[in-house]
Image (cartoon, helix red, strand yellow):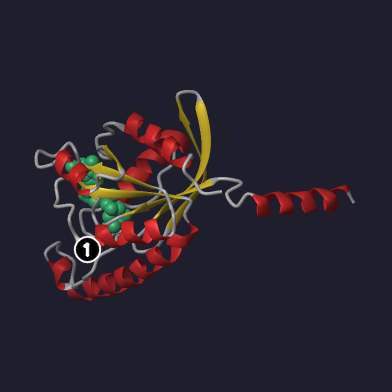
Amino acid sequence: MVKVITNFFKRIFSSLFKNVGDVKLGFYGPPNAGKTSLANRVCKDFTGEEMGNVSKVPHETRNVQFKEKVEIEYKGKKMTFKMIDTPGIATKIDYEDFLKYKVNKKDAKSRAKEATQGIVESIKWLDDMDIVVIVLDASENPYNQVNITIIGNLVARKIPVLIAANKIDLKKADMKKIEAAFPEYDVVGISAKKGKNLEEFYESVFKLSKKIKK
Ligand SMILES: Nc1nc2c(ncn2[C@@H]2O[C@H](COP(=O)(O)OP(=O)(O)OP(=O)(O)O)[C@@H](O)[C@H]2O)c(=O)[nH]1
Ligand SMILES: [Mg+2]
């Protein structure tokens, strides 16, 4: 009987507060930007485990992958996240692009097919996110259809967005250009690979979590 009553109150409580429980943190962005590298870095820091494979070949992540109960600590404060690493979103996938990475034709074709399905999956999961980190390569031109489409989708769904300008260790990285492209969003420059500026990243994620619509 006690259990029935507890469950009843739990149900009422969670229907009142949609975001009760762990914060669903999605990593979105174009292929090869470093989403998995960043997700791995965060996971490794706080759980000791990694999330998935990293590769210089684009579309390495072709299925949405999850890590539950990642407790991030920043300046003595703790928050628990469900992390979601997603396949890179692209407007065009051509199997021939994989051939230059010494992927054989058959594998390149199946990689292209899986990558296309992966994009559909990424978009499908968007609705489920509480907050989203858009991971961009800071050495590349930020003005492109993919970035604009992802941000537009998030704004329409009122999902708080943080832009992580990754690969700031590269000479070509241009933070000013990224900031100028997205003046109305928080932009944090990081290097997932070298572990640069992660503290600032965690601070921004905590700040972002306060913006979740109840
Ligand atoms: N120089 C540099 N390279 C990085 C950094 N972060 C990731 N990389 C490299 O960028 C490539 C792509 O990294 P991933 O983490 O697989 O990128 P992703 O966004 O998950 O890519 P998809 O799964 O294909 O969408 C790899 O070769 C990484 O080693 C960084 O901070 N600096
Ligand atoms: Mg990936």
Between residues 29 and 42, which one lies in front from this camera angle? 29
- Residue 71 drawn above or below residue 87: above
Left or right relative to 189: residue 170: left
Q: Position of residue 36 (x, y in %)?
A: 33, 50
Q: Residue at x 29, y 43 (%)?
A: 164
Q: Does residue 150 appear in the picture of this structure?
A: yes
Q: Amino acid at mark 1?
A: Gln
Left or right relative to 93: residue 126: right
Q: Position of residue 120 (x, y in %)?
A: 37, 70
Residue 150 position by quadrant = bottom left
Q: Position of residue 81 (x, y in %)?
A: 50, 43
Between residues 211 and 65, which one lies in front from this camera angle? 211
Q: Secondary structure at mark 1?
A: helix
Q: Residue at x 14, y 52 (%)?
A: 141
Q: Give the labeled residue for mark 1.
A: 145
Residue 100 position by quadrant = bottom left
Q: Does residue 34 appear in the picture of this structure?
A: no
Residue 168 position by quadrant = top left
Q: Residue at x 24, y 43 (%)?
A: 165
- Residue 184 drawn above or below residue 30: above
